[in-house]
Structures are given as structure tokens and as C-alpha cells.
Amino acid sequence: MLSLGENRVYSPPGLPAVRIAVRDGAVGFVASDCPDKVCVHSGFLSLRGQSAVCLPNRVTVRVAAGEGETLDSITY
């Protein structure tokens, strides 16, 4: 889990080309080596229930907590 209150850039283990940023209480894909970049174009998420997925890399980001709380999961 990542805190939405701590700005940082994260790459899932084994996927250095996939970068997920936590910035100002929101989270989003900022880079990926997938061909269409739908995950990157999803923008930043900050509301409970929002999610973004990079299907080719099998990475999902989902916000499951309220503002200032923790990000529920990053899976790969």
C-alpha cells in the first residue's frame, strides 16, 4: 500500500518501465512501455473507487480509501 499523502514515484518489482506517481493526494501512471498508453492517459486518481489498469503489464492501481488515506493496492 502507498499513502496518497507522500509524493513519490514507484515502479512495480520487475517492471522498471512502468512508473506510478503519487502527487498531491492523487495517483496515476506516468510512464509505461505498453503500446497504447491507455493507463498513462487515464490521468491521476484521487477518489475512492477510481482505478487505472495497464493490461499488457498486468498492473492495476485502485483508490480504496478517502482523501489523505492509503492507496489500497498496486497489483502486477
Image: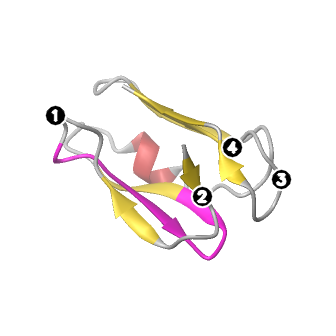
Image height check: is 19 above or below 75?
A: below
Left or right: 57, with 74 as reference point: left
Image quarter hosting the N terminus: top right
* Amino acid type of the residue tagged 4 in the rendering: Val
- Marks 4 and 2 sit apart, C-alpha to C-alpha, by 10 Å
Give the magenta range: 16-27
* Amino acid type of the residue tagged 3 in the rendering: Gly
**Tag 2 or tag 3, which sits nearer the N-term?**
2
- Residue 14 shows which numbered tag? 1
Image height check: is 25 above or below 14?
A: below
Q: Position of residue 71 (x, y in %)?
A: 63, 47
Q: Is 20 one of the magenta-colored residues?
A: yes
Q: Which residue is mark 4?
A: 63
- Marks 3 and 4 sit apart, C-alpha to C-alpha, by 8 Å
- Marks 4 and 1 sit apart, C-alpha to C-alpha, by 22 Å
| Tags 4 and 1 touching, CB below 8 Å | no
Q: Which residue is mark 2?
A: 3
| SS type, badge 3 | loop
For the point 71% across and 58% down, the residue is 46
Q: Which residue is mark 3?
A: 66
| SS type, badge 2 | strand
